[in-house]
Image: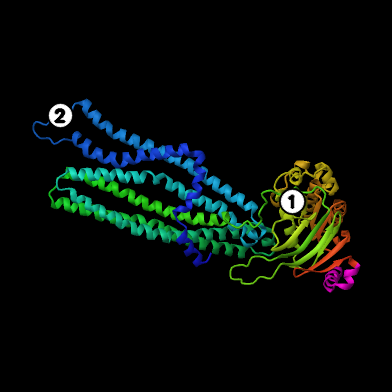
């Protein structure tokens, strides 16, 4: 984030930013009220109870030894001494339950915030992930929520009891100062309290800015780490170990510097307030000495004054923690308030079981400009074509021609900037997103399999169109031969990012998932690229079976797949420049002929 954005945020993001999240407290109102009551008891016992003991109980235990002074009986002495553990028992018990209950409520609320962020990530458009690093998003969901949790839980322990402690001490101080002759001047020492507001406010502003920068550095460091762990083969293949170490060292050092700035401002406030309060107490001692006030009269008042100043110091620390929490909350809000762009219909149409026709009508799409960009060229421009039921169409074109963008819009990962995509004459935006996507089987060029069993990975594709068993889907995709070799057969786990299977096996399992899904619309993003001839042949055989009876769109990176298509669409710079059979467009389209000849030559 740039500096202007930070300044703008700093001026608009305040304590009210927490208010929308108080609704999460509704299920936990009873423990929350209990926490507030315990905090109230703690504050009264600390702020008023301790000065009361010093002022009223201790003088009776240690009376002036003047002639004729009655001696306390053992019962009276034990009664007075019992006040001391009783006050601390009340103080300790109420403090414990205040901390426990408020932490219980806080952790529940923050868990809901984390789940809300994760849920929002599930519905954000593809463009959001293209603009944000994976590591930074990971940092927001984990590090920022942890930082918010840490800050708010630190705040929660003192937010109730410190103000009550301050008020209790203030009441005790006023009562004792008025009761003692010549001690009313002590109230002037409270003038230090408004002075403390200025450093609290200024340090809080600086701290929020530094905390925001620190969380951004955490995101950058997490991105470097995530990228390194994902590219472990490339790192070793190109001997990039030293380079990666330097990248991480630099990122870690930047985070350390940002962290130290937060530490500097978060720790500077306590000594500042302590110095100011020490000045106030010193002034009280000076005036008491000049007024010839006795020590036993001064000690309770000074004690109450000190107890009144201590919550001010802790409230300053609370303000610092709130600023750190606001910095994390801002980064989470950027995800929570991100524009979804894919808007579901409140009353969607029912998805047709039989797909008669898919039509792209004057479809245009332009990506949102990046920061600093004023004009962005359209990714797709005035696309007009139809695909009939059961027809197979291959999309061919150079890199960046718009093939993947076209597929993304059919799946409603993105919506057209203008124009319509129609299924059986109805705009796909009129259907429920879930129903639309259930009617599509997507096999990506780089399919993702989860670290779960083979059976569970295939079962992910289950839809209302599913008619085959998992075993039948595996046989149709030519996957049974290697599944049978696994020790656990269909129960074998595939490892993180399917590292326990080869590239060809991974592609065949992805096809098995598509067979099992059996949706009427099939999208194949070249499943045979970068494979050896044996695997390519097996996958081509599976694809021939898979496309039968389905309305198919395939992105053809290798022209061997074009033979499976009934028709070819050639895209270049977001426009369709050729549409027809291979023989005709080879003769009439220079772009297609060049791509075909180049691949044939290799």
Q: In terms of depth relative to the viewer, which is nearer, 361 or 289?
A: 361
* N-terminal-most mark, 1 or 2: 2
Query: Which residue lies at the image location 70% right of the left edge and 69% below the top edge?
Result: 378
Query: Which residue lies at the image location 41% right of the left edge and 40% below the top edge?
Result: 36
Q: Is residue 134 above or below residue 470?
A: below
Q: What element carries label 1?
A: helix
Q: Is residue 130 above or below residue 81?
A: below
Q: In terms of depth relative to the viewer, which is nearer, 118 or 288?
A: 118
In the visual, does 241 lie left or right of 92?
right
Please name which of the two marks, 1 or 2, marks the residue nearer to the observer.
1
Q: In this view, does 99 lie above or below 589?
A: above
Read off the magenta span: 583-602
Outermost residue, right side: 583
User: Label 2: few (<14), some or many (≥20) within 10 Å?
Assistant: few
Residue 153 image offset from top left, x and y in percent: 46, 46
Alpha carbons under labels 1 and 2: distance apart: 91 Å
Q: Does the magenta stretch include residue 281?
A: no
In the visual, does 379 lie left or right of 93?
right
Q: Is mark 2 on a helix, strand or loop?
A: loop
Most common SS among magenta residues: helix
The tag on residue 114 is none
Where residue 73 sits, quadrant-wise, is top left
Query: Which residue lies at the image location 52% right of the left edge and 46% below the top edge?
Result: 110
Whether pointer 1 and pointer 2 mark residues with C-beta atoms closer than 8 Å, the reply is no
Q: Could you tell me if residue 557 is visible in this image? A: no
For label 1, the residue is 436
Outermost residue, left side: 67
Q: Could you tell me if residue 40 is visible in this image? A: yes
For label 2, the residue is 71
Q: Is residue 596 magenta?
A: yes
């Amino acid at each position: 984030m740039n500096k202007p954005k930070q300044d703008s945020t700093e001026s608009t993001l305040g304590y009210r930013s927490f208010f929308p999240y108080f609704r999460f407290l509704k299920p936990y109102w009873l423990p929350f009220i209990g926490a507030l009551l315990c905090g109230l008891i703690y504050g009264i016992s600390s702020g008023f109870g301790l000065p009361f003991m010093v002022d009223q109980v201790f003088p009776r235990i240690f009376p002036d030894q003047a002639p004729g002074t009655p001696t306390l009986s053992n019962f009276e002495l034990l009664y007075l001494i019992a006040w001391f553990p009783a006050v601390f028992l009340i103080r300790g018990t109420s403090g414990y339950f205040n901390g426990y209950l408020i932490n219980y409520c806080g952790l529940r609320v923050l868990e809901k915030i984390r789940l809300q962020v994760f849920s929002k990530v599930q519905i954000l458009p593809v463009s959001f992930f293209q603009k944000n690093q994976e590591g930074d998003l990971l940092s927001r969901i984990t590090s920022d929520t942890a930082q918010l949790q840490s800050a708010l839980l630190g705040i929660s322990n003192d937010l109730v009891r410190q103000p009550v402690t301050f008020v209790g001490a203030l009441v005790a101080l006023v009562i004792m100062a008025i009761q003692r002759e010549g001690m009313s001047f002590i109230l002037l020492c409270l003038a230090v309290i408004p002075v403390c507001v200025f450093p609290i406010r200024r340090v809080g502003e600086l701290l929020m800015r530094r905390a925001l920068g620190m969380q951004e550095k955490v995101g950058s460091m997490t991105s470097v780490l995530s990228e390194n762990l994902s590219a472990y083969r490339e790192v070793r293949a190109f001997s990039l170990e030293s380079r990666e170490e330097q990248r991480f060292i630099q990122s870690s050092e930047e985070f350390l510097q940002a962290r130290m700035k937060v530490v500097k401002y978060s720790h500077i406030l306590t000594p500042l307030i302590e110095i100011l309060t020490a000045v106030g107490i010193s002034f009280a001692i000076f005036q008491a000495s000049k007024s010839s006030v006795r020590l036993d009269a001064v000690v309770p008042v000074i004690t109450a004054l000190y107890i009144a100043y201590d919550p001010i110091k802790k409230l300053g620390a609370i303000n610092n923690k709130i600023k750190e929490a606001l910095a994390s909350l801002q980064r989470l809000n950027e995800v929570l308030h991100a524009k979804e762009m894919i808007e579901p219909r409140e009353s969607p149409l029912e998805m047709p079981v039989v797909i008669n026709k898919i039509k792209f009508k004057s479809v245009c799409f332009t990506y949102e400009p990046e920061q600093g960009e004023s004009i962005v060229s359209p990714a797709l421009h005035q696309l007009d074509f139809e695909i009939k039921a059961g027809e197979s169409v291959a999309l061919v074109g150079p890199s960046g021609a718009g093939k993947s963008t076209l597929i993304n819009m059919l799946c409603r990962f993105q919506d057209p900037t203008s124009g319509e995509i129609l299924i059986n004459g109805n705009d796909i935006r009129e259907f429920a997103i879930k129903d639309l996507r259930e009617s599509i089987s997507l096999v990506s060029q780089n399919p993702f399999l989860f670290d779960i069993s083979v059976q569970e990975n295939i079962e992910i594709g289950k839809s209302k169109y599913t008619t085959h068993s998992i075993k039948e889907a595996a046989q149709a995709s030519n996957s049974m031969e290697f599944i049978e070799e696994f020790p656990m057969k269909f129960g074998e786990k595939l490892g993180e990012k399917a590292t326990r299977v080869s590239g060809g096996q991974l592609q065949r399992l992805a096809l098995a998932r598509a067979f099992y899904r059996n949706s009427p619309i099939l999208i194949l993003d070249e499943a045979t690229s970068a494979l050896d001839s044996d695997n390519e042949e097996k996958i081509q055989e599976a694809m021939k079976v898979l496309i039968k009876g389905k309305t198919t769109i395939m992105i053809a990176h290798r022209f061997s797949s074009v033979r499976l298509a009934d028709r070819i669409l050639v895209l270049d710079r977001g426009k369709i420049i050729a549409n027809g059979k291979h023989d005709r467009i080879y003769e009439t389209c220079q772009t297609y002929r060049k791509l075909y000849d180049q691949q044939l030559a290799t």
